[in-house]
Image: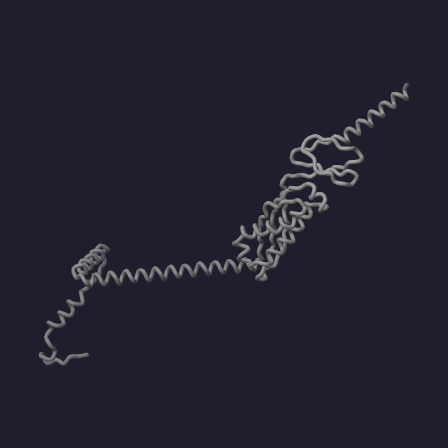
Amino acid sequence: MNSALVGIVIGAAVLLLLLMASVKIVPEYERGVIFRLGRIIGAKGPGLFVIIPVVDRMIRVSLRTITMDIPPQDVITKDNVTVRVNAVTYFNVVDPNRSVLTIEDHIKGTSQIAQTTLRSILGQIDLDELLINRDEINQRLQRIIDDVTNPWGVKVTLVEVKDVELPEAMRRAMARQAESERDRRAKVIHAKGEFEAAQTLADAAERLEGHPAAMHLRILSTMAEISSERNSTLIFPLPMEVLRLIDMLRPSDAVQGTPRTA
């Protein structure tokens, strides 16, 4: 009786283990790639399904987007400047079967190809282009990496260059360049201001010359401004026409017997 009971318990335990090994539950974001006697029969899921214990083997593959940092890379740009660049890439599996059959570890493979592509592409561009055309470079990296990972059933959706670390000497040179550029712009703006001021003064002088009354009013206005400051000296300007008239009315030195001095 005891041996029969032990046999029943052992049989129930084995049956339970086989049932647990045969029933699989895969969540929505995963697929189960099934191999039967070494041959792939396809991906199953999501949900509950049954496999044949011992005969079938299941490999879980996640379909969620993976965010992976590309480690900092020392890159020599086209204009021979050494920079340290790091980036981030986003990718996900779109074909579970190929991600298992064509590559041993699709995450590690994507990481390695992203690092090598980053060094290769950034080595073909100048430093100024790297700092300015960041979006174009990101799209170029995404296209190249995606073309390589596509046979693996992996889709690279985004590659972003996060940080570009410049050498200290290069940062100082760029600071001097920016300062020189600001000085140049300041001098150009100052020169344009002087030119416009001189042109405005020339227009004003030309207009005042054509209207003597306006000239006299301007003189009186200037005298009023000077007198309001309580100065001890008052300068009274005379038009050149008045001076010429006085010179014409002055008796001739020849008539008075006095020689004219130069």
Relative to 237, does residue 12 appear above or below in the rendering? above
Instruction: Please give left or right for residue 35 compared with residue 188 in the image.
Output: right
| Residue drawn at point x = 72 percent, y = 44 percent | 101
Question: Which residue is most to the top?
Answer: 1
Q: Which one is nearer the viewer's eye here, 118 or 244?
A: 118
Q: Quadrant of the C terminus?
A: bottom left
Instruction: Please give left or right for residue 7 compared with residue 232 in the image.
Output: right
Instruction: Please give left or right for residue 256 compared with residue 225 in the image.
Output: left
Quadrant housing residue 75 = bottom right
Quadrant housing residue 39 = top right
Question: Which residue is most to the left?
Answer: 255
Relative to 107, does residue 210 appear above or below in the rendering? below
Q: Quadrant of the N terminus?
A: top right
Relative to 182, does residue 8 appear above or below in the rendering? above
Quadrant housing residue 126 = bottom right
- Residue 234 in percent (x, y) is at 20, 61
Q: Which one is nearer the viewer's eye here, 30 or 224?
A: 30
| Residue drawn at point x = 43 percent, y = 61 percent | 184
- Residue 148 in percent (x, y) is at 65, 50
Q: Which one is nearer the viewer's eye here, 137 or 150?
A: 150
- Residue 90 in percent (x, y) is at 61, 44
| Residue drawn at point x = 28 percent, y = 60 percent | 200
Label tally:
0
- Residue 210 in percent (x, y) is at 19, 62
Relative to 41, does residue 130 appear above or below in the rendering? below
Q: How is the image coloured?
A: one colour
| Residue drawn at point x = 68 percent, y = 31 percent | 47
